Image: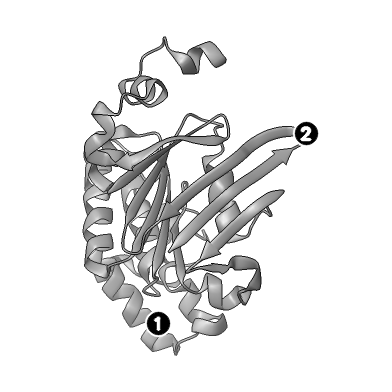
Amino acid sequence: MIQLRDIHKSFAGKPVLAGVDLAVGRGESMVIIGGSGSGKSVLLKCILGLIAPDRGQILFEGRDVNGIERDAFLSRFGMLFQGGALFDSLPVWQNVAFRLLRGALRRPRAEARAIAIEKLRRVGLGPEVADQLPAELSGGMQKRVGLARAIAAEPEIIFFDEPTTGLDPIMSGVINALIREIVTEMGATAITITHDMSSVRAIADRVAMLHDGVIKWTGPVAEMDRSGDPYLDQFINGRPEGPIAALR
C-alpha cells in the first residue's frame, strides 16, 4: 500500500535519511524502531508530505504521492500524535470530531458529536467525558481521546507516533491492546514509530529498524529475536555495547 524507494533527507548538511527502502502492505501493522534521533519522525513526515525528501520516491497504491490530490490523499489517513496534541480550548468531543467539523469530511454538528461519542466509547471513555476539556483528563485518558480522534473519520491508514510515551506500564498495555484491537477490527494499515519494545511486540505484524539513515533489518515480529542482525539484537535487548554504541 505504501512504498518508499531510496528516500534521502538532510538538514543543514547532516544526513538523517540516507536511502530508506520500505514497503508496507495493505492491512499490515508495521512498527519502525530505532534510537532517539534516528529519523523515525522525519520518515513519517515525509510520507505525509509535511517534509519533502531530497531524493527518492514515495508510492501510495502504486502512484507517486506527488501526483495525488493533497486533500484526497490526507483524508485517508489518521494519526495519533506523540504528545496527544489535543486542542486545550476545545471540549473533548470537538477534539475527536475535529476533521468532521470542517473541510472535505464535514458533517452536521449533531452527527459529528454522535460519531465522537461513539469513538470515545470505542476507546473505553463514557459520554460524560465529551464536554470536558483535555486539561481535566489524566494522561492516559488524553491518549485515548487522541486515539478516538485518529479513528473518527474511519481512515484506511493510521500513524502512531510513540503511542505510549509518558504512560505507566499498565496504561501502556491498555493503549497497546486498544491499538491492536482497533487496527484489526477496522482492517486498517498501521505504521507505528516507537522505541518501546513492549509496544512493538503488542502491535507489530512486521518490524523495521532504522539506524544511520537506512533500514538495517525488516521482517516479521516473530523473527525479531532470532534475526542474527547485530544492530537489531543490541537495540531490542538494550545492550550498551555493540555496533550502535561503537558508531556514536
Q: Residue at x 41, y 11 (%)?
A: 240
Task: Using the image as rendered, state which of residue 15 and residue 113 is in the foreground.
Answer: 15
Q: Is residue 16 visible?
A: yes
Residue carrying label 1: 112
Q: Using the rendered view, name the quadrant where residue 112 is placed.
A: bottom left
How crowded pointer 2 is (Cα within 10 Å; few <14, some 14-19, many 20+) is rated as: few
**Where in the figure is residue 110, as x and y percent of width and height?**
39, 87
Task: Using the image as rendered, state which of residue 245 and residue 139 is in the foreground.
Answer: 245
Q: Using the rendered view, name the quadrant where residue 42 is placed.
A: top right
Q: Secondary structure at mark 2?
A: loop
Q: Amino acid at mark 2?
A: Gly
Q: Amino acid at mark 1?
A: Ala
Residue carrying label 2: 13
**Where in the figure is residue 238, as x and y percent of width and height?**
35, 19
Q: Is residue 170 left or right of residue 85?
A: left
Q: Residue at x 33, y 79 (%)?
A: 115
Determine whether 144 is above or below 39 in the image.
below
**Of the residues under marks 2 and 1, which one precedes in the sequence?**
2
Q: Is residue 222 left or right of residue 228?
A: left
How crowded pointer 1 is (Cα within 10 Å; few <14, some 14-19, many 20+) is rated as: many
Q: Residue at x 50, y 74 (%)?
A: 75
